[in-house]
């Protein structure tokens, strides 16, 4: 639900934007006329041949910029080519990025391959995470690169930091106005001719075998730790509920056993219907506060449903589970453990847990409704 609301909120500026262009599947969106405001483009391919007087935001497989952008450029694409001036920042996440023009501010790029041509000029900083980076042209600010193979042949006004587990190559003609700091498998004494100060930090090439071994050890360790932590939280929840309302969970378990089908369909309607209602209310200014209140109730109902499932499963194993608080807690513990073990069964486990959860929420909802009708809260 948080993801849905956040996405909807972030999307509001897009829908309200005067220049919003969306292409159909495999369709190319081409901009040939100047646009005087922020522009949003979503398409298989985006080609901008005219000037944009505001920010430009693009999501596409391929993006080619042949017109001037008067603000920032934000782009997520498979391939990005920037051929005309960007007066603001460039922020790009792509498979390949090529910069062949002037950028008046910073460039921040995450890419498999970055190529800056000899004509490229960056008047701010260059920050790159890349598998392969080639930096030519000129950078007025600092340069920070982390990646695989890095090649530099540029005039850089500030400091340069490079972290590579592959290779760093600095070609003749490079000028670094500040300090060069680099982390690489091998030191190159020739780099001292390109910068006023050079600092080398030794690293060793990493083998995937130790990392794979660590991951193979960590995955089950993290999974077991998460299950233990979840079990502790559930047990604390059960202890609190049994102490404060000793009749609640046994009463819900009995109510579910009387009619499993009714508990299931009511729980299913609640789990699916309430989020839809919240989403509809969230689209209106009046319904925002009501949505938050309903969301709180929804969360409490889900917690109550989970506790009800644990008590229900435990009551199948332990007879006369409601006689004493200690017996209730034992029943709750047994049900919680079995519920958790069912959840780790591949493929079918999550389906069984979902069905049980729906039944638990439905039973808890029915109990709360009956108690409300009778005036007992």
Image (cartoon, rainbow, N blue to C red):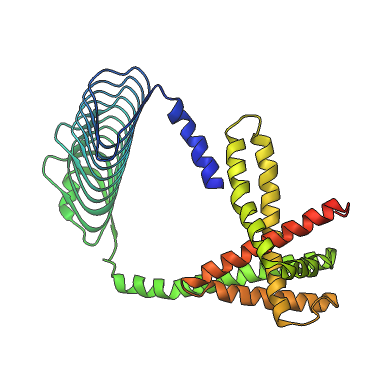
Quarter where residue 357 is shown: bottom right
In the displayed structure image, the side of residue 369 where residue 58 appears, left or right: left
Q: Is residue 41 above or below residue 265?
A: above
151 and 318: which one is in front?
Answer: 318
Q: Quadrant of the C terminus?
A: bottom right
277 and 208: which one is in front?
Answer: 277
- Counting the numbered discs, the total is 0
In the displayed structure image, the side of residue 169 where residue 357 appears, left or right: right
Residue at image position (61%, 48%) is 273
Q: Is residue 17 above or below residue 212?
A: above
Give percent across and percent down for residue 177: 25, 37
Residue at image position (42%, 24%) is 17
Quick one: which residue is furthest to the right in this view? 375
Quarter where residue 376 is shown: bottom right
Q: Is residue 307 above or below residue 162?
A: below
Residue at image position (18%, 49%) is 191
Quarter where residue 87 is shown: top left
Q: Is residue 185 above or below residue 191?
A: below
65 and 289: which one is in front?
Answer: 289
12 and 118: which one is in front?
Answer: 12
In the displayed structure image, the side of residue 117 where residue 338 appears, left or right: right
Give percent across and percent down for residue 339: 62, 73
């Amino acid at each position: 639900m948080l993801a849905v609301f956040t996405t909807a909120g972030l999307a509001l500026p897009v829908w309200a934007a005067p220049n919003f262009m969306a292409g159909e599947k495999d369709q190319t969106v081409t901009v040939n006329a100047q646009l005087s405001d922020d522009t949003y483009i979503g398409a298989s391919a985006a080609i901008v041949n005219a000037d944009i007087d505001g920010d430009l935001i693009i999501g596409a497989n391929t993006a080619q910029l042949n017109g001037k952008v008067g603000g920032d450029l934000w782009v997520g694409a498979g391939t990005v080519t920037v051929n005309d001036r960007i007066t603001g920042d460039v922020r790009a996440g792509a498979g390949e990025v090529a910069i062949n023009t002037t950028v008046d501010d910073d460039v921040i790029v995450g890419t498999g391959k970055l190529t800056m041509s000899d004509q490229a000029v960056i008047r701010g900083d260059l920050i790159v995470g890349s598998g392969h980076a080639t930096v030519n042209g000129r950078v007025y600010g600092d340069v920070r690169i982390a990646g695989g193979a890095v090649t530099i042949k540029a005039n850089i006004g500030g400091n340069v930091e490079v972290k590579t587990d592959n290779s760093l190559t600095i070609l003749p003609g490079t000028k670094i106005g500040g300090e060069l700091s680099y982390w690489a498998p091998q030191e190159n004494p020739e780099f001292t001719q390109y910068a006023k100060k050079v600092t080398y930090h030794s690293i060793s090439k990493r083998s995937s075998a130790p990392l794979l071994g660590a991951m193979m050890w960590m995955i089950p360790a993290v999974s077991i730790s998460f299950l233990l932590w979840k079990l502790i939280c559930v047990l604390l929840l059960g202890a609190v509920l049994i102490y404060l309302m000793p009749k609640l969970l046994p009463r819900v378990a009995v109510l579910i056993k009387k009619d499993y089908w009714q508990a299931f369909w009511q729980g299913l309607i609640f789990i699916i219907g309430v989020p839809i209602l919240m989403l509809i209310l969230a689209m209106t200014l009046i319904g925002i506060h009501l949505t938050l209140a309903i969301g709180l109730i929804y969360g409490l109902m889900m917690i109550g449903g989970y506790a009800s499932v644990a008590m229900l499963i435990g009551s199948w194993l332990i007879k006369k589970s409601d006689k004493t608080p200690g017996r209730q807690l034992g029943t709750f513990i047994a049900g919680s453990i079995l519920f958790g073990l069912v959840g780790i069964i591949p493929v079918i486990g999550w389906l069984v847990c979902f069905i049980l959860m729906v039944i638990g929420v439905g039973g808890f909802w029915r109990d709360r409704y009956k108690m409300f009708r009778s005036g007992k809260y």
